Image: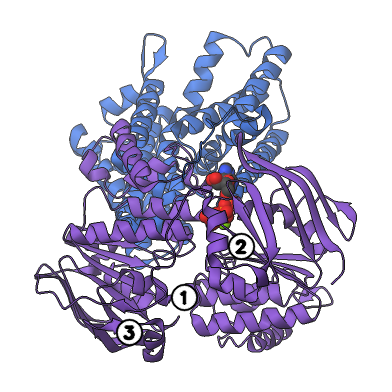
Chain colours: A blue, B purple
Amino acid sequence: MTISVAVPSRDSLGARLRGQLRNLAPLVTLVALVALFSSTSPSFATLANLSNVLQQVSITAIIAVGLTYVILCAEIDLSVASVANATGILVAFLTVQDASVNIPNLPLPGALAIAGGLLGCLALGAVTAFGVTRIGIPSFIMTLAMLQIGNGICALLVRGQIAYSVPPVLLTLGAGSIGPVPWIVVVAALVLLAGHLVLTYTRFGRYIYMVGGNREAAEHSGVGVKAVVGAALLICALCSGVAGMLGVAYFGSAQQNQFDNYLLDAISAVVVGGTSLFGGQGGIGNTIVGLLVLGVLNNGLDHVRMDSFLKILIRGLVLLLALVVNVYAQRLRAKYRSAV
Amino acid sequence: MGGPLLELRGISKRFAGVAALSGVDFSLRAGEVHGLVGENGAGKSTLMKIIAGVHAEYEGEMRLDGRPVHFRSARDARDAGIGMVHQELSTVPELSVAENVLLGAQPTRMGVVSWRRMRAQAQQQLDAFGIHVDPRVPVGSLPLGLQQMVELARVLLSGARIIILDEPTSALSPPEVERLFALLARLRDTGRSTVFISHFLDDVLRVSDEVTVFRNGHLVESARAAVVDKPWLIERMVGAGHERLGESHAGNMLLGERSNAPVVLEAEALAVPGLFEDVSLAVRAGEILGIYGFMGSGQLELARALSGKLPLGGGVVRVDGRTARLRGGTPAAKRAGIAFVPESRRAMLFALEPVYRNISIAILERIGRILLRPREERRIAEGHVQSLGIRPPLVDRPVGQLSGGNQQKVALARWLTHLPRVLLLSEPTRGMDVGAKDDVVRIVRGLRDAGIGIVVVSSEPETVLSLADRILVMRRGAVTREFAGETVSKDRLLAAA
Ligand SMILES: Nc1ncnc2c1ncn2[C@@H]1O[C@H](COP(=O)(O)OP(=O)(O)OP(=O)(O)O)[C@@H](O)[C@H]1O
Ligand SMILES: [Mg+2]
């Protein structure tokens, strides 16, 4: 039977825009925020302030890369900030501290201390991955437990104290700069780039999307779903660990609870950027936009001199709005579903 | 019977600029069963989704009881007394059977859902329909056929005046189909109208008062079912100038002699507690083994266990004489050379991903170990789309936009590039039109001739008869009978099940 299939003419503009809601809404938000703050505050739209914004989101960015992988798989990791904190403290614990710091620590050469930090966060990630993929604990619960475990490790290592020294390399990468550009921004950009390249151009990246898109179908295609989810959780822990080590240098100290804001920030960045909470849709590009939206919002609110308590509420409202868009975009997607 | 209850005039619907329906006039009388037939992609589901409020954007007008209506949502349509059973199940797998049966109509006491009344009411509805399941279990844990029954129960007993059934029997075995038909007759007697879409033309002719044929987005012709026959339908479905296939498999089939090619798949004493026990079988290279049983006899689960999806309780599986360690799940089965196409499209396709990615997913590691090669993926997919006649032949389309039968072909295409040793097919022709079924038969026979071992499990006698070289019959989780080297008919098969 012969059917001549007309080459699809363009969709109506409205339909195309609606299909792109997930990607367009965050961009529009970003542009609107930049326009708003630029017009209300002369100090906002300056090169120096751009550098500020970028610096402020860098640590969140590194964590958000790992989190993007996990959320694309339709899982969640609530332990990112806690793993970052534990790793940062572990590195400080393995570094010679000033005599005034009264922690029974275990000084090692800088390279070994960093290796120890990396191993530490990978070990935590491996426990999470094991619990989620082998035992079958929902990631929401498993990482909640890991959040507490990470906090416990922090508490045991520093015992309420504050450590200040980290290996010199970390100090450079976390707090130094090349010319006008802070190293931490460069590192964050590289991590984002690597995260994007792996997601877009490798087989593993494709598996991440397919597992998130339809886990059962991925399984029926012979994809090692557990291995993919486990790897995403490991990558997330590694990103958190790296962020934690650099964060300690960036803050100039290692202490308990210093990363607490980063859990919500990193999740917000991923979700505000439009990556689907239900998996399979989105990517690092979305996360970058989400990071900038949050960064501009936080920074801009400072420039318009606003009640800092109101700021907290505003951030909550922005997150709520992003969730609404996210779920609405999902509903549009479900329309296709009805056909399968 | 009075004037039309529902009347559609000049209905057109386009998806992304491509016409799915063009100027369709359709009417449904009160108290009639109206059969709808047409090839895959003819537009049957699309028209019904317009009536049921799923597609709110279309051209043309719809009148219910003579009054113009335009449904914006499925809820609007439901409130107007229109209920639809979708081709792909729309039950909610996580919810219990009871919740699914009463979805949207849960009994409440002072605003709070009354669980006890809900269970009792659901149980009553299910009993009325002759379904015996515990209303408390999640629907997702039931086999596909029972899920379909649950969904049917929900819509049939919802009190809707117009009931649309889009391929309701595709996962049912003959006794359930009979029960459904009896119920349709009862509904008709109470003045309800039913639209019945099916690729089983005999069934359509049997239960319908009126039949309508669709082709390529057009309504070709409507006629009284009593005055037409199957060739009449096929002629209109396929279009003029095509003398295609009568019915090849309704009659007797002569099965081949047992071959003596080497055994590729050997299973010994397989068991999954509660589903099947002590099942042994062997499939030779270049052989198609059919496994037939009524719904719930364990044959679908057997296929899932062989694919590594369902953990085995006991037994050994060997491929080419080597033990396959199926504990490792589907990746292990794939490494051992076993490929599986499950019966549910929801479980095998990535609706939002383009066709080419749905095809390449199983062979990515062969295309590039680390890096993707999208151009190569597209090239391979284009080859399959051509050779399988997938329409529209666009590999960048999200697969969710294809019609049911074309989706099925995409799922099959996944395993055609690098042949597995063993191919497990669960209900491979489910929801396909006559022509597409023949395509699948041709493809599967081609694979057999290429020397792989094929297992076809189905609760549809025609599917097994049209494909198999040898047939095992399962009943209640055990193999009860083997047919080989003899003539079998549908009757003998049913009698053995
Ligand atoms: N959501 C959608 N987006 C784009 N195109 C679609 C969508 N749904 C259906 N189509 C297209 O519309 C046409 C008619 O599809 P429809 O599902 O109505 O066919 P059908 O007659 O029900 O076929 P089948 O017997 O295979 O179920 C097909 O070409 C299909 O690809
Ligand atoms: Mg259909």
Find residue B473 and name its label.
Answer: 3
Q: Tag 2, which secondary structure?
A: loop
Q: Which residue is mark 2?
A: B86
State yes or no: discs 1 and 3 in contact (Cβ < 8 Å). Answer: no
Q: Earlier in the sequence, mark 1 or mark 3?
A: 1
| Residue A159 seen by the camera | no
Location of residue A322 by image quarter? top right
Mark 1 highlights which residue?
Answer: B143
* Residue B412, horizontal then vertical, whole percent: 35, 55
Which residue is at a point 47% across and 55% down the rendered structure image? B405
Three-letter code for the amino acid on which mark 2 is drawn: His
Instruction: Choose mark 3 or mark 2, whichever is in front.
Output: 3
Mark 1 to mark 3 CA distance (whole Å): 18 Å
Q: Nearer the viewer, mark 1 or mark 2?
A: 2
Chain that bears disc 2: B
Residue A119 placement, left or right of B32: left
Q: Residue at x 51, y 36 (%)?
A: A4
The amino acid on which the numbered mark 1 sits, given as a three-letter code, is Pro
Asked which secondary structure carries label 1, the reply is loop
Q: CA distance from mark 3 to mark 2?
A: 30 Å
| Residue in the image at 32% along x and 22% along y | A172
What chain does mark 3 sit on?
A: B
Q: Percent x, y for residue B232?
A: 57, 62
